[in-house]
Every structure is written in structure tokens, then in C-alpha cells.
Amino acid sequence: MTTRTFFSFGALALALGLSTGCASAALPQHVGEVNDIFAARNRRDLAVSVPGEDEDWEKTAAEVPKLLSKPLDADGAVRIALAQNRELRAAFYEIGIARGRFVQAGLPPNPEIDLSVRRPNDPAQPLQLDIGIEYNLTGLLMLPLRKGVAEADLAAERLRVAGQVLDMAYAARTSFYTVQARQQELDLRVRALKAFQAGFSAAEELNRVGNLPEMDLATQRAAVESARVDVAEAENRLLDARENLNVALGLSGEQTRWNIAAPLPDPPAEALATERVEERAVASSFELQELEARMRAASKRAGLAQTEGSLPHISGGFHGERDAAVWEIGGHVTVGLPFFDRNQGTVLSARSEFGAQRERYLATATSLRATVRTAQNRVESAGRRARHYREVVLPAREKALAETLLQYNAMQVSVFQVLDSQRQVTQAGLTYVETLLDYWNARAALDQILAGRHRGLALGPAGAARTNLSSGSDGAAAGH
């Protein structure tokens, strides 16, 4: 009997209600998992506010207006960054990407149904029905291995985002320190300008009564105008520093009208605890732990590829055919023999990935140890220099200026020496501020390393960057 196919459906998904977990994970879970990592390290100060089930981040930033309503300090800046920075929020969504792959890897393969209806050429004959079901048995056997790979990738992603939380906190803290330093620099420049203006006013009066030559008066005026330019440049540097901090904190509009609480404090008198610093840094490093997780993932990926390549692809199923009133039922097994494609390329790729991650791990461990020693040395050196400037250099410069003024009033020295002495006082104050900034940046870097992150630290070259006075003032001194 001849027949012709009427219609056919292939590869239809059958919902069996099988699942290895929730099809999606809410964003609060991602944030909570990273917070748990910091809680285990006793660093709850780095916890990020957990959004609600509706993923409304604005509710998590409720504390921001309260922090901005009073003078801001470094800890408050960190809290705002963790609550409001959108780059950090994006990182938590990226955990969901890895979790989605983990959930997908744990789902069993869907069965396939093939259904066909045929109508015989003889109209007197009834319709003929064929139905078959096929299931990928190899895919089911590989399920634990695939899930293990995705789980290792998810663990690595959590550690990466935890490191990004540290990066954000560090960026906010060091940006705040820079604002404090630039504000102190501006205050020193303004103070120097007022001193030069007072000197120029006195010089004008002396010149009016004929007791000061025109050249000395012009020199005083040049010093005032150069100091005015210095103030304008310091104001611009302060504005730049404030905008950098606004970016780190995620602030815009009216939120940018904040004020800082205080200038950079002096280094503490107590010595820094240095016991087992390298050992603590290695034990807490998120970068090393992330690389370990990625090595595990690469190793499991290689094992999965090798197992899949060695095992034959097996699928089985049942088939039923209804002819008139009779059903004929049978089963079958399909075996794909791994003669040619045994996942050789995938295995090689996974093993190479493992080797690359292992070498990066060793390189990172070496870099970490060197960086922690550098940060520790920088903290100790900058602290000693800052104390020396505060206790020795600044008092000496101020005393020299006072003595020079006495000598000038007695007409024993020229105006050029007075101006030079005033510049030296201002220069010492500026260098002290830069040394303080160097100290607190190094202190933040050391804290960052011990918290678990050592890359991207703003240590810079050794020694404070000296901020010179304007060339106009230098020219006046050179004229003397």
C-alpha cells in the first residue's frame, strides 16, 4: 500500500518539569553573596546595600542625602560610592550572567518527539499515525561535569566582583584624599597671596614717601601678580579633584555641592603593625583566589571535553505506529562513534587555558609580595618625612622668615631676600601637604592590599611631588 506524508513535526520540546534550580536568581542574591564574602573577613564596612526584589537601586541610596548634608569625610565618601556608583551596580548584574550559565548547565536535555500523520492513497483506508520519542542519554550523563565547570566560573565571577568593590572603595578614598590636599594647597596659596599683598601695600607707602626704589616696588608687584596666578591654578586643580571624586561617588546635579570635613590629618604617632604582612596579603588576595577558581574551571573544562570526546554519543527512544486499529511499538538506540572528532581542539584549548592561569597565578603572587613591601616602605618613609616637615622644616622656615623681616625693617637685607624667604615658607607648606597625600595614599594602598586587592594602586614615584611657585616669582629672585 502506497502512502504520502500529510504533515510532520520534529524536535518538539516536552515540558517534564525537570529542573536543577531556580531559572533565574534575583539581583539581591548576587549582592548578598558578595557581602557574605566580606562578612567572613570581618569587613562589613564594605557591604553594599541590597536592592529590593524590584531591583530598585535608588532605595539603596537613601543614606546618600544624609551623608552629603554634613561635611564629608573619607569613610562617608566610601559609603556613598558603594551605595550609588553605577559601574559597581553593573558588576553585580554580571554575576547574573555567570549564574545564568550555571543554571543552564544544570538543566537536563529536552526529549524530542516526532509525530507524523499519513493518509493512504486508498480513501477507504483510515489515517496512519507515527509517533516517536528521542532522548539524549549522553547529555544527561555529562550533566554533573558541565555543572561543575559553570559552578567554578560562577565562583570566580563572585571573587572578581568582590575585588571590584574594593577597587571602588579605594578609588573613592584616594580621590577624597586628593580633594583634601588640593584644598590645603589652595589655602596655602591664598595665604601667600595675602602676605604678598600686605607687603606690596607697605612697599607702596614707602615708595610714596621716597624710602623705596621703583625697582623694589615693581618686584613686590610682580610677586603679588604671580601669587594671584598661583591661586587661580590651585583653584582649577581643586575643581578637577572634586569632579574626579564626583565620578567615583556617582554624584551629579545638586549632589555635587558637598563640603569636606577637615584637611588631611597628620600621620598617627603609633607605628604601623607589620607582622606577617606578606603572608596576610597573599591569604586575603581576591586576585589569587579568582585565578585559583579559573584554574579549577579550566581543569574541569578539560576533563569535560575529554570525557565527551571519548564517550560515544548515545541517544535512545521509542517508536509507535498505528495502522488501522493496531499499534506497533518498538525501541531503538543511536550510537555516535568517536572516530574522528574526539574534542581534541577543545581539550587542547582548556589545557592551555589552565597553563596560562597557572603562570598568571605565580606572576601575581610575585607582584603581590613586591607591591606590599613597596606600600609598607612608602607608608613608613612618607610618615617620617611628614613628621620631619611638621616638626623641623616648617618651624625653621617660619623662623627664618621672621628673622628676615626683622633684618629688612632694619634695612640690613633687600626686598628680594624677604620675598625669597616667603616663597620658601610657602614651598615648605606645599611639600608638607604633598607628603601627607603621599602618606595617606600609601596607607590606603596598604589597606587595599591587605583587604584583597593589589592592582591599580596610586602609589606613584617615591617622594612627594614638589609644587613649585610660579616662574614669575623665581625670576624676581633671580634678578636679585
Image (tube, rainbow, N blue to C red):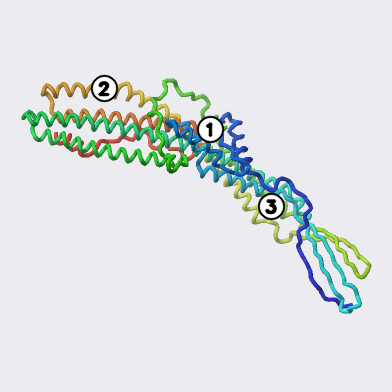
Residue 386 image label: none
Q: Residue furthest bottom?
A: 122
- Regarding residue 314, the answer to whether it shows in the image is no
Q: Where in the figure is residue 376, as x and y percent of width and height?
A: 45, 29
Of residues 117 and 41, the one nearer the viewer is 117
The residue tagged 2 is: 396
Q: Classify 10 Å Cα crowding around label 1: few (below 14), some (14-19), many (20 and above).
A: many
Of the numbered discs 2 and 1, the one sitting upstream in the chain is: 2
Q: Residue at horizontal 51%, vertical 40%?
A: 84
Residue 451 image label: 1
Label 2, label 1: how many angstroms apart (C-alpha)? 40 Å
Q: Secondary structure at mark 3?
A: helix
Label 1, label 3: how many angstroms apart (C-alpha)? 37 Å
Of the numbered discs 2 and 3, the one sitting upstream in the chain is: 3
Q: Is residue 367 above or below residue 300?
A: above
Query: What residue type is disc 1 on?
Result: Ala
User: With 195 as the anchor, is 142 left or right in this view?
Assistant: right
User: With 167 as the anchor, is 344 left or right in this view?
Assistant: right
Instruction: Determine which quarter of the picture holds residue 180.
Output: top left
Residue 305 image label: 3
